[in-house]
């Protein structure tokens, strides 16, 4: 039960988040200060911020649910993350730093055209807005149940505070609140593990019982591409998605550019991967511990019909002592606010730099960026409200849009890095074909339409498909247009 002590802990945390935002907003800020922290942010803080942005509240709640219902095989995602770190470190970060860009998609105007840059920015904004809506909505379901408030109220509480401190402090507020939020998030997972271990006979007993019931299985060498829980899917195909996010997402690029040097940016990237592994292990073990707690040791019983997604929220409310429940709810809020603040700050930068293509970066740019922050925050809340009203599978829709946008965006970066005379029309047509290709394998989930090849490949393959079709189409069209041009002459 959520008591007044829990409320005090939660409110104290929320006020601390606001205080940090106000503290770092002191003094007059240039556009570079507001968006990039003056290009002098500590790489450790940036690395923590990168992982805080990545994990979100869905990790806090979804990872335990996944292991409770299955096992730890999605830990193989870390193989993909490991591969992506090398690609980002050797290819993306050096290119970003030496080109002098202020946004990820500015590079497309330098290589192709302004229209290509704007198209990429629009696709990115669409993808991030949809993702933000889901990342706000998912934890709010739990928050509304635990706190006994309407889901829309839960969404508004997290959103209002994140918008407030981001509006005042810019990227500095986002990064430093991310550091605090990650600490609460990570600490919350460890506290839950300690609490459960005490009730089931200690860590050794908990681990043995989890292993005996198959919850510690984390490796599957199968080469079946239709199964997402195999090495070839979760370990290798997922590397494309991880590279697309770490290399083509403005949230990441903006943090790389906030570091003093390429070396510092690489350090922050590696640190985020290491912390990502630790976070995954902790929260997968929370799921295994919950299984032992309820299904093996029978410390307490679950209500009839409790789904895997409801087990952890039920544990938070019914089994944790007063004060600790408030801390865990604060951790959920922390993850939700981290996702939103990072998104709206990056969307603001993308709007100013890549859609409006404003050349001068004076005080007016900072004012506009602040209002774009508010506007995107409001739109993010609207997207969360829409997600709350949907009847279909949010997971399927989210995975569809992830593959739809991330693969083609990564393809555009590859074309920008390795070609010098690619026509912009070829890139644009390639992107559109890459996006359309996913309907063959994934259909259109939000419309209830299945593709003719649905089920052949699991969801980690979707970004690889759209990326491959984008690149192949761009080169084929370039070849055809050049051949026609030669023929005419």
Image: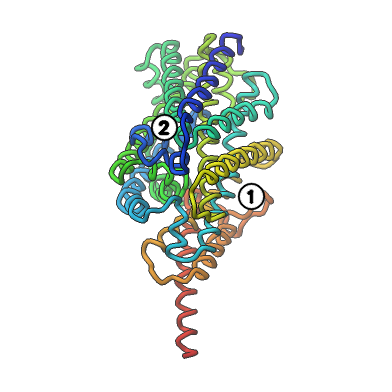
- Please name the residue shown 34% across and 17% down the image: 204
* Residue 210 drawn above or below residue 170: above
Q: Is residue 66 visible?
A: no
- Please name the residue shown 61% across and 55% down the image: 443
Task: Report x, y in % for residue 133.
Answer: 61, 39
* Residue 56 drawn above or below residue 436: above
Secondary element at image label 2? helix
Task: Report x, y in % for residue 430.
Answer: 51, 66
User: What residue is shown with label 2?
Assistant: 280
Q: Residue furthest left?
A: 263
Tell me which corner region of the image, top left, top right, bottom left or bottom right, holds residue 191.
top left
Cα–Cα gap, marks 2 and 1: 28 Å
For the N terminus, give its image quadrant.
Answer: top right
Q: Residues within 10 Å of mark 1 (few under 14, many from 20)?
A: many
Secondary element at image label 1? helix
User: What residue is shown with label 1?
Assistant: 445
Q: Residues within 10 Å of mark 2 (few under 14, many from 20)?
A: many
* Residue 201 drawn above or below residue 350: above
* Residue 223 drawn above or below residue 313: below
Task: Report x, y in % for residue 7.
Answer: 59, 13
Report how many numbered discs are placed on residues in the image.
Answer: 2
Q: Is residue 127 visible?
A: yes
Chosen colour scheme: rainbow
Mark 2 / mark 1, whichever is N-terminal: 2
């Amino acid at each position: 039960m959520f008591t007044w002590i829990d409320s005090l802990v939660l409110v104290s945390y929320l006020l601390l988040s606001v205080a940090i935002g106000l503290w770092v907003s002191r003094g007059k800020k240039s556009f570079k200060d507001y968006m990039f922290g003056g290009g002098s942010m500590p790489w450790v803080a940036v690395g923590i911020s990168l992982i805080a942005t990545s994990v979100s509240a869905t990790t806090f709640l979804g990872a335990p649910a996944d292991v409770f219902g299955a096992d730890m095989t999605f830990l193989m995602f870390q193989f993909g993350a490991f591969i992506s770190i090398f690609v980002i470190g050797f290819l993306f970060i050096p290119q970003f730093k030496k080109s002098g860009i202020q946004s990820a998609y500015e590079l497309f105007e330098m290589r192709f055209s302004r229209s290509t840059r704007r198209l990429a920015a629009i696709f990115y904004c669409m993808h991030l807005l949809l993702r933000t809506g889901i990342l706000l909505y998912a934890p709010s379901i739990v928050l509304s149940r635990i706190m006994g408030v309407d889901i829309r109220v839960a969404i508004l509480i997290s959103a209002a505070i994140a918008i407030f401190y981001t509006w005042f402090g810019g990227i500095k507020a986002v990064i430093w609140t991310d550091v605090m939020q990650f600490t609460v998030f990570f600490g919350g997972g460890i506290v839950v593990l300690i609490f459960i271990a005490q009730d089931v006979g200690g860590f050794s007993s908990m681990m043995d019982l989890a292993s005996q019931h198959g919850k510690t299985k984390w490796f599957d060498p199968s080469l079946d591409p239709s199964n997402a829980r195999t090495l070839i899917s979760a370990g290798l195909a997922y590397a494309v998605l991880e590279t697309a996010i770490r290399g083509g997402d403005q949230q990441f690029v903006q943090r790389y550019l906030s570091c003093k040097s390429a070396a510092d940016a690489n350090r922050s990237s590696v640190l985020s991967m290491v912390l990502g592994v630790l976070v995954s292990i902790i929260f997968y073990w929370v799921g295994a511990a919950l299984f032992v707690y309820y299904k093996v040791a029978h410390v307490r019983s679950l209500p009839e019909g409790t789904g895997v997604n409801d087990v952890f929220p039920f544990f938070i409310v019914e089994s944790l002592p007063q004060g600790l429940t408030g801390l865990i709810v604060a951790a959920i809020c922390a993850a939700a606010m981290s996702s939103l603040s990072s998104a709206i700050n990056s969307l603001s930068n993308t709007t100013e730099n890549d859609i409006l293509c404003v050349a001068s970066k004076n005080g007016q740019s900072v004012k506009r960026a602040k209002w774009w922050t508010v506007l995107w925050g409001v739109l993010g809340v609207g997207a969360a409200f829409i997600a709350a009203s949907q009847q279909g599978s949010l997971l399927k829709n989210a995975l569809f849009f992830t593959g739809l946008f991330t693969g083609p965006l990564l393809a555009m970066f590859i074309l920008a890095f390795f070609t010098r005379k690619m026509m912009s029309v070829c890139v644009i047509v390639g992107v559109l074909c890459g996006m359309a290709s996913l309907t063959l394998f994934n259909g259109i989930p939000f419309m209830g339409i299945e593709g003719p090849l649905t089920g052949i490949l699991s969801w980690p393959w979707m970004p690889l498909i759209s990326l491959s079709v984008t690149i192949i189409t761009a080169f084929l069209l370039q070849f055809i247009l050049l051949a026609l041009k030669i023929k005419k002459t």
